[in-house]
Structure formats: C-alpha cells, structure tokens
Image (cartoon, rainbow, N blue to C red):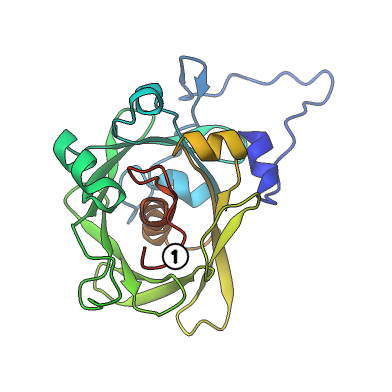
Amino acid sequence: GVAGARSYGFQVQAMGVPPGLVVPPIQNQPIVEGTIWMPVPPQLPNCPPGLEYLTQIDQILIHQQIELLEILTGFETNNKYEIKNTLGQRVYFAAEDTDCCTRNCCGPSRPFTIRIIDNLGHEVITLQRPLRCSSCCFPCCLQELEVQAPPGTPVGYVVQNWHPCLPKFTIQDEKRMDILKIIGPCVVCSCCEDIHFEVKSVDESATVGRISKQWTGFLKEAFTDADNFGISFPMDLDVKMKAVMIGACFLIDFMFFEHAGDNKQRTGVWQ
C-alpha cells in the first residue's frame, strides 16, 4: 500500500513515534483478516453518511483484487477493489454486482453496479453504469456513470465527451452542472509506464488533480486484469465530487484497462 503510494509520486506520512511516547490505541479502527481500516471520522453536517472519510484525504489508492478463477478459466468474475489512503489504511471496499450472463457476454463494455462499503459494512456509495455505445459513429450514446451517496440519492455523474482522438469526460454535480473535466492521453497503452488522466477546471485552463493507472509489471499486465490506480484531488474539494472522481476511475478502468475476452487490452479511444 505505502510502496504503491510512492510510485504515484504521492507523499507518504512518516509513521515513526518519538522514544518514550506512549500512544493510546486508536478507536474505531477494526483489523479484519490483517487489514487495517482508516479510523472512523466524526459525522459532519451536510455530508452524506460515509463520505466523512473523504474530508481528511487528498490522495487515494485503488487496488483491484486478483481473481484466481478468472486467471485459470478465463471466466469473467465480479471485480473487487480495495480503496486505501496513502498510509495503506483501507478507506472503502468496492465490489461489482453484475450477473454472470452480462459479465461474460458484454465483457468490459457491460453495464454494471459497483457497491462501495465502509469499515462498518454500510453501503455508502453506489456506482451505476448503463449499457452504452463506445463507437465514434454514435456520439449521442456515449458512456455515462451515475454516482449515488447514499444509495438511491444521486450526487453526481461522469459523462464521456465526444472527441476523435482523446478520452475526455465531464464531472457533473447532482444538478447536471459541469464541475470538472478529465482528459486522457491519445493512446491509452500501459506499456512499462504509468498512464495519467489529468483532472482540470471546466475551462481546461488549470490542472487540479489526476487519475493514474500504475504499471504493475509484465506478467501481471499480461495475464490478469487486476489494475492499480492512484487518484489525487484538492483537499477542500466537495466530498460529493471526490466520490464522483472515484466513480470516474472505475469507468476509466472498464473502458480502457479491463481485458476483453481475447485478453487484449484496448488502447484506443473508441476500441
């Protein structure tokens, strides 16, 4: 977790304790099967329940779990992800909830629901992607993702923008007002290097954050579709928009880095 943070260029806080200092145990920090969760923050007014964690962080690491059954059989399983802070503490756990037929017939283009839970087991964010077209011949039916927090209450959207060369998205609030833009590279190919999607102001004049796909090594890239991402955003960004940026990361993963049935990564904007 912490080593992964350095690979994104993120600053990791030191964990050293001065000699003689007695540190009291951290409350509300469960350890489940060796996993250390981020301490539960106090509830805040006007903050959707479960998003209080996001008020304390400006960088997130997302690690997709390797599915052994998928590696051995090629049978597409539901994706699962750990969402951590730069200390390696788990902030959330995310799991795809898609039926078997849809996963294996539609592949990476499938519609999906991803449920994100906190360390108390509560579903705090729901991501819903409808079935849409990825062809440049149909610019009126591009990719879109709805972010709900709590489930059933939309707080924002990720909308793909038509462009002949670049992957471009708009982050919108619950009223469909444009808040941020995301712009990726012309060729999305993770060949021995990280890939960066820049998060910019609405007029695209200033860079305010980044979504990065980390190169994880030849064997892992070739034989699994387990991906690692880093997200950075302003500390004072609205927590709802931070949640939408997490959703944008998952949409980008499925669109460009989730292996298709022939195990070939899609590298173009419209492939």
Please, is residue 215 above or below residue 181 in the view?
above
Q: In the rendering, at what x and y percent does residue 203 appear? A: 48, 85
In the shown orientation, is residue 236 left or right of residue 44? Answer: right
The spot of residue 133 in percent (x, y) is 23, 65
**Residue 58, visible in the rendered structure:** no
- Number of residue marks: 1
Q: Is residue 75 left or right of residue 101?
A: right
Residue 195 relative to residue 177: left or right: right
Q: Nearer the viewer, residue 20 or 170?
A: 170
Q: Is residue 141 above or below residue 78?
A: below
- Residue 177 left/right relative to 57: left
Q: Secondary structure at mark 1?
A: loop
Q: Quadrant of the N terminus?
A: top right
- In the displayed image of the protein, which residue is found farthest to the top? 33
Q: Quadrant of the C terminus?
A: bottom left
Is 165 above or below relative to 28? below
Residue extending farthest right: 19
Q: Is residue 26 above or below residue 193?
A: above
Q: Which residue occupies 56% across, 24% down?
A: 26
The residue at 38%/49% (across/down) is 44
Q: Is residue 74 visible?
A: yes
Q: 10 Å neighbourhood of mark 1: few (<14), some, or many (≥20)?
A: some
**Between 61 and 109, which is closer to the camera in this rendering?**
109
Q: What residue appears at the point 43 percent right and 40 percent down from the top-left corner?
A: 42
Residue 264: image location, x then y, percent? 43, 48
Residue 93 image offset from top left, x and y in percent: 39, 34
Which amino acid, mark 1? Gly
Residue linked to disc 1: 268
Identify the residue at image location x=39%, y=79%: 163
